[in-house]
Image (cartoon, helix red, strand yellow):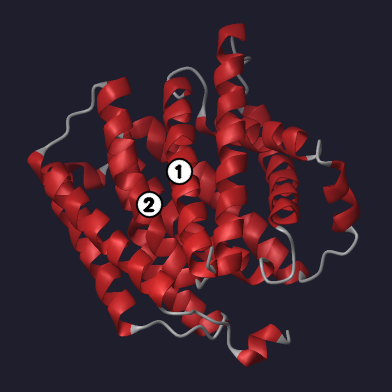
Amino acid sequence: MPGAAKAVAWSVVSAGTFAFGQASVKLLSERLPPAELAFLRASVGVLIAIGAWRLLAELRKARHPFWFAARCILGVIAIYAFMDAIARIPLALATLVLFSRLLIVPALAWLLLNERVEPSVWGAVLAGLVGIAVALTPTLGEWRDTGAISAFIAAIASAGSQVAVRRLAQAHSAGVIVIVNSAAAGLLLAFPAAAVWVTPPLGDLPVLAAVAGFALMAQYAAARAFAGSRAAFVASMDFLTVPMTAAIGFLVFSETITPHLVIGSALILASTLYIAWRGTHHVLRLPETQKSA
């Protein structure tokens, strides 16, 4: 399978596991505070990740501390802010706001990684964002909600984190990136989680395990996707999560699917399919200067 096609496949896996992971968080958000959910998501995840013993040996070869630090710090900010958003506003709305990061990723990749972004990709990204705007039209009054503000903060931090993953994926395995991020996130989130700790009921433990498992798989799949193609291309594939979370919100949480959401999702899917087609029919390569970095 060509590299770009693999990137598309891994992006689909990442989008799906991310959607199911956020649905699991939504189930728990009525009983557990956002800081605790973010901590448990990270700390349970690292316990699963260290089961792959060979990754521990690879940690000694880790390089690029700046990019690891950027990935971890921005990732923690994104996790915490998004947990807060999910607890306050509908799942589909929180996800839609989060994906405003897709305007930021190509610009950061161009500035920091010297990646060329084709005009057609920019056009497809903008079409996807128009789809988001259409889907949000009935809920514009909720933009004043602090949950929407949290989702915007998560979008900005997540964009920077994705660019860092793209850079790290050129020199490290997906497993190493995941385990370092999970360990750092667990440490950074331990103190705010302790301040608001609520002991989870035993019945919630399987859901917590699902949250961690889906989060790990989403991170791993995203890292594999970023290793195979440009940041702007892979990030655009995240649009697939929008209709997925809308469907889960409708089936599990009885959230309304409006005509605006259907039309917006159609625009989003069309832009995603175009970007996927463009990426699989045009070889996307790193600049020579970055290959030698």
> Along the line of sight, which residue is nearer the eye, 242 or 224?
224
> Along the line of sight, which residue is nearer the eye, 143 or 220?
220
**Quadrant position of residue 191:** top right
Which amino acid, mark 2?
A: Leu
Please tell me how crowded label 2 is: few (under 14), some (14-19), or many (20+) other residues with Cα within 10 Å.
many
- Return the residue at label 2: 98
- Residue at the front extreme, as displayed: 1
Q: Which of marks 1 and 2 is nearer the N terminus?
A: 1
Answer above or below: position of 176 versus 256: below
> Along the line of sight, which residue is nearer the eye, 90 or 269?
269
Please tell me how crowded label 1 is: few (under 14), some (14-19), or many (20+) other residues with Cα within 10 Å.
many
Residue drawn at x 70%, y 35% is: 43
Q: Regarding mark 1 in the picture, which secondary structure is present there?
A: helix
Residue drawn at x 35%, y 73% is: 278
**Quadrant position of residue 198:** top right
- Return the residue at label 1: 82
Which amino acid, mark 1?
A: Phe
Q: Measured from the top left, where is residue 126 in percent x and y?
A: 25, 69
Which label belongs to residue 13? none
